[in-house]
Image (tube, coloured by chain):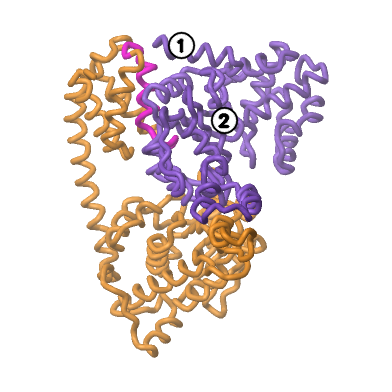
Amino acid sequence: MGAPRNLTRAMLAFGAMLRASGLPVTTSAVMDAVRALEAVDVMDRAEVYLGLRTVLMSRMEEQPAFDRCFEAFWRFHAEEGEGLDGLVAAVQPVRQEEELDSGAIEAAREKQAQVALDDWDQGEAADDEPLEVPGLSDREALMEQDFSTFPAEQLDEVARLTVQIARRLARRVSRRRKPTRRGGVIDLRRSMRANLMKGEIIELRRRARRRRKVRLVLLCDVSGSMDLYSRFLLQFLYALQNVFRRVETFTFATRLTRVSDLLRGPSYKGALRRLTEVRDWSGGTRIGESIREFNQTWGRLVDRRTIVLLLSDGWDTGEPDVLAEEMLTLKRRAARVVWLNPLLGNPSYEPLTRGMAAALPLVDHFAAAHNLASLRDLAAHLRVR
Amino acid sequence: MRAEIRKIHEMMESADYVTDPAIATSVHLAMTLKKPLLIEGHAGVGKTEVAKVMARMLGTALIRLQCYEGLDAAQALYEWNYPKQLLHIKLEENTPHTMSEKEAAIFSPPFLIRRPLLQAISATGAPPVLLIDEIDRADEEFEAFLLEVLSDFQVTIPEIGTIKATQPPYVILTSNRVRELSDALRRRCLYLWIDFPGFDKEVRIVTRKVPGVNERLAREISRFMETVRTIRLAKVPGVAETLDWAQALSSLHADHLDEELVTETLGCVVKDADDVKRLKRELATGGIGRFVAAQS
């Protein structure tokens, strides 16, 4: 197998470029790319493009980034028809550009992270410490207190309790049924072995039927009016994302952002830093438009085994009609739609905002989310019929 | 264009599958690199068809594994034929065979039910095409199991031993994106996204598959579908719907689209009550002209 060395080098550089653009390109994929180039007409630019795309792309969403990289890779020397030579010749300049780019991005990232930390560091706990349960009386008091009234020194405690609640919730939702002697499905294979010499099946062996799992989709309002609650709710989202496997998380204010991957990780601090980069955390809320965006782009994440949790105070500057329509779409697809509203903890609150009024009839469960107790009580509603 | 790719292109066309260079290139690479090809796309764009055509093209068997929620190894790989085993035990009741002899007898290949994955692995002769359809419907646990099988194409059956494919099958996986697939699975596969066909391709599909439709009607149908897909619907119609509709129009001896005809046959195009309502509203306000007028 004599793949020219410069071809391999070109593909390695191209792979690095794709990785820098966020595509998960492995070295073995790069080796496949080299083999793919041997199997296509390398003088035919369109064919090289299609071939490399087949090997190096792994989901449709990556296509814009892939196209940009491919374009950049060919830009330097490859005029139409110049083929592989252009590809190889393009390697050097691209390398430099890439370094430059990633350096600039790194610097910007650092700066943003600093801003984020200024904002949030008072609420930081050392996330990796084992969970400690505070004394019962303290704990009860904390459970009932409204999030917005916590003094800074109690935030650590609250964060820990939040994680604990999320863990319990996740366990509750995903627990498998215990094996029983009756019920379940008959395990013929084991029955057959157990009764081999008896001539007929006397004793049936059973196996518990596997419980179908529930999936969670979290949509969290992070607009200005939610500021007092966002940090607790985000902590809750972070905890859920990391203890419960089948969960997807989105934040929204005026636009929707998928943050599942950003929340994943061992440290909450790190997650927050990543979240800050995509921050859209102030200004108005357009719940209807945000849910529309969700339905259009991510609707496939929702099925009859999915519970959608919407965390928002319902202050909507968008059109109530849009919200009602999109809630209906969501309700049709999902097993349950649960709306958590931190304002509901206030006894004098009535869900009279236009948005809330439009959405309320389409929600399966409407609950408070202003203190730890309300998050804890959520478990009862996270079940699929 | 590489000769092999052109040949695949031609063979697919002659197998009545209207294709494009992207599909032909991906199929060629899947065969050359011997890697599974993951095909994603909206419902009804002809993902499954690729595997069928590939089998026809290669003159080899198509083995299909239809995925669904709860699919497990017993359904996908192999299972023992319990009724047959039971019968055998009963028949052997008074023979002098020992326990281990009886056991060896009933756990031998004649009592094995080969499910699609095992069929594909144990196939003799030309490597078959293994179609794993709608992998997104299976559970994540099954995906992990499948990865294992796809990585070395061998299966160990405790009672019989290890069976290894002499020639690994060509593997096509399809997904409607009901669920995100794991990165591990994606890494293992080549990737092809099949979008809704462009106007020209759809015209070719219609004229090829529904001979009763004339050129003008085919163009109008395709233009109409192109416009409909830009409207936000609960279920965006695919090529399957286009063909249903063309078939219906052809049996009504239509030679062009008009508003009445479209309204009457709208049920072929969209299949959701709200979508029908929405489309009727669009038709009432914009008229048919908006849908069939040449765009740009």
Give the residues drawn in magenta, as a range. A42-61
* Residue in view at x 49 percent, y 35 percent: B173
Q: Which residue is mark 2?
A: B48
Q: Amino acid at mark 2?
A: Thr
Q: Is-magenta flag for residue A188? A: no
Chain A colour in the picture: orange
Q: Quadrant of the N terminus of chain A?
A: top left
Residue B226, image x, y percentages: 61, 26
Mark pair 2, 1: CA separation: 21 Å
**Residue A141 seen in this snapshot:** yes
Residue B280, image x, y percentages: 75, 35
Residue B206, image x, y percentages: 66, 18
- Kindly check if marks 2 and 1 are in contact, taking CB atoms under 8 A apart as contact: no
Q: Is-magenta flag for residue A58? A: yes
Task: Identify the element where label 1 is drawn.
Answer: helix
Chain B colour in the picture: purple
Q: Chain of mark 1?
A: B
Position of residue A176 in the picture relative to residue A237 (left or right): right
Position of residue A36 in the picture relative to residue A299 (left or right): left
Question: Which label sits on residue B6?
Answer: 1
**Front-most of residues B92 and B188:** B92
Question: Residue B292's quadrant in the figure?
Answer: top right
Question: Which label sits on residue B245?
Answer: none
* Residue in view at x 51 percent, y 57 percent: A215
**Front-most of residues A279 and A194:** A194
Question: Residue B112's quadrant in the figure?
Answer: top right
* Number of marks: 2
* Residue in view at x 51 percent, y 31 percent: B130
**Above or below, comparing residue B63 to residue B277 in the picture:** above
**Residue A325 seen in this snapshot:** no
Position of residue A34 in the picture relative to residue A162 (left or right): left
